[in-house]
Image (cartoon, rainbow, N blue to C red):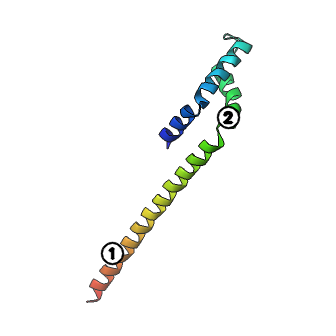
Amino acid sequence: MQNLLHSELIECGWRDAMKDQCKELIRQKGLEAITSDELVRELIPVGRAAVPEGVRRRVLESVKGMLREERERELIMERGARGYFNYLGEEGRR
C-alpha cells in the first residue's frame, strides 16, 4: 500500500510540489529561524489538500480490495474450522 501511494504521489508531481513548498517556507522564514517541526506543522495541511482526487480514489479502492480479500480469507478459515469441528463431532458420535 505504501509503495502504491509513494509511486502515485511521485508520478502526479505531488512530491516535487511539496519540495517547492518546503523551500519557499525556508526562504520566507529563514533557515536559522525555522525548525523541522514548524515545517512539518505548516506543510501537513498543504500536503493533504494537494493530493489529487484520482490518487485518493485509487488508494481507497486498493484499501477496500485488501479488506475484502482479508475478510474472504477469514470466512474461509472460519468455514474450514467449523467443518473440521463438525467432522470431529461426527467422529465422536460413532
Query: Residue 7: x percent and y percent?
Result: 51, 36
Q: Which is more foreground, mark 2 or mark 1?
A: 2
The residue under the point 35% across, 80% down is 86
**Helix, strand or loop at mark 2:** helix
Q: In the rendered image, which quarter is residue 44 located in?
A: top right
Query: Label for residue 18?
Result: none
Q: Point out the tag, 2 or 1, that comes first from the N-terminus.
A: 2
In the image, what residue type sits under mark 2? Ala
The residue under the point 48% across, 38% down is 3
Which is more toward the observer, 89 or 83?
Answer: 83
Q: Along the horizontal axis of the image, is 3 left or right of 34?
A: left
Q: Residues within 10 Å of mark 1 (few under 14, many from 20)?
A: few
Q: How crowded is mark 2: few (under 14 residues within 10 Å), some or many (20 or more)?
A: some
From this view, report whether residue 62 is shown above or below residue 34: below
From this view, report whether residue 88 is shown above or below residue 94: above
Q: Pointer 1: what residue?
A: 84
Tally the numbered discs: 2
Q: Do the residues labelled 2 and 1 touch (CB within 8 Å)?
A: no
From this view, report whether residue 56 is shown above or below residue 40: below
Which is more toward the observer, 26 or 41?
Answer: 26
The outermost residue toward the right is 28
In the image, what residue type sits under mark 1? Tyr
Query: Residue 55: x percent and y percent?
Result: 59, 42
From this view, report whether residue 36 is shown above or below residue 64: above
Rounded to the nearest angstrom, the CA distance separating label 2 from label 1 is 51 Å
Q: Along the horizontal axis of the image, is 29 left or right of 73?
A: right
Q: Pointer 2: what residue?
A: 50
Query: Residue 92: x percent and y percent?
Result: 28, 84
Query: Residue 60: x percent and y percent?
Result: 58, 49
The residue under the point 54% across, 37% down is 8
**Helix, strand or loop at mark 1:** helix
Which is more toward the observer, 57 or 26?
Answer: 57
